[in-house]
Amino acid sequence: MILDHLQQLYDYNYWARDLILNKCEALTAEQFLAGNRFPMGGLRDTLVHTLAAEWIWRKRVMGESPTTLLNNEDYPDLVTLRNAWAKEEQAIQAYLKTLSEDTLAAPLKYSTTKGDPKEEGLLGILTHIVFHGMQHRSECAQMLTELGHSPGNIDLIVFLREA
């Protein structure tokens, strides 16, 4: 039951991500790369931050503890970002298929990028990935709306109704 719910959250995560990325296609390169008042910066930088969080947490739950995040400049355009994110989505979806209800209850030990040891429950980490993305998708939705390209309603209930 929990695994089914978790899968549904990840399906929502990528559905909402695609709403944002699809609207980014209407932007000029300058608009996509421009800075902004939001905490992570403009659209590209906020999206890369969101991808980086998914990537680093997946690495951690799979037993690695990277010491750096992804670099914004490695994603100079929307196509490069989309391609990288598609690979990350495949990797995390494959990982989710390896889980059992018992493994979700297990604590996970990892290190932060600064090397500080931490321990969290696996289910909490996997849920965090989706909620973290939701926070930054909301910021991107606001940026897009201000540029005249609202992604529309990115609520979970809209996804559930469409699914």
Image (cartoon, grey):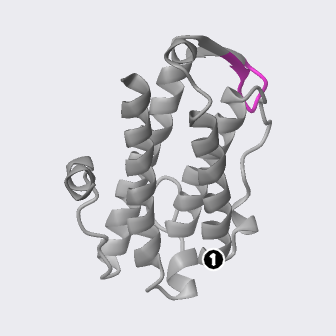
Give the residue pinned by disc 1.
79
Please indicate whether residue 41 sits to the left or right of residue 112 in the image: left
Quadrant, the C terminus: bottom left
Q: How far from the left and from the top, in percent, is residue 155? A: 25, 52
Binning the other alpha carbons within 10 Å of mark 1 as few (below 14), some (14 to 19) or many (20 upward) gives few
Q: Residue at x 37, y 69 (%)?
A: 143
What's the residue type where badge 1 is placed? Val
Q: Residue at x 66, y 28 (%)?
A: 61
Q: Residue at x 58, y 11 (%)?
A: 106
Q: Is residue 112 magenta?
A: yes
Quarter location, residue 103:
top right
Quarter location, residue 122:
top right
Work out whether 49 lies above or below 24: above
Work out whether 128 lies above or below 132: above
Extent of the magenta region: 109-116
Quarter location, residue 33:
bottom right
State the predominant SS element of the stretch in magenta: loop
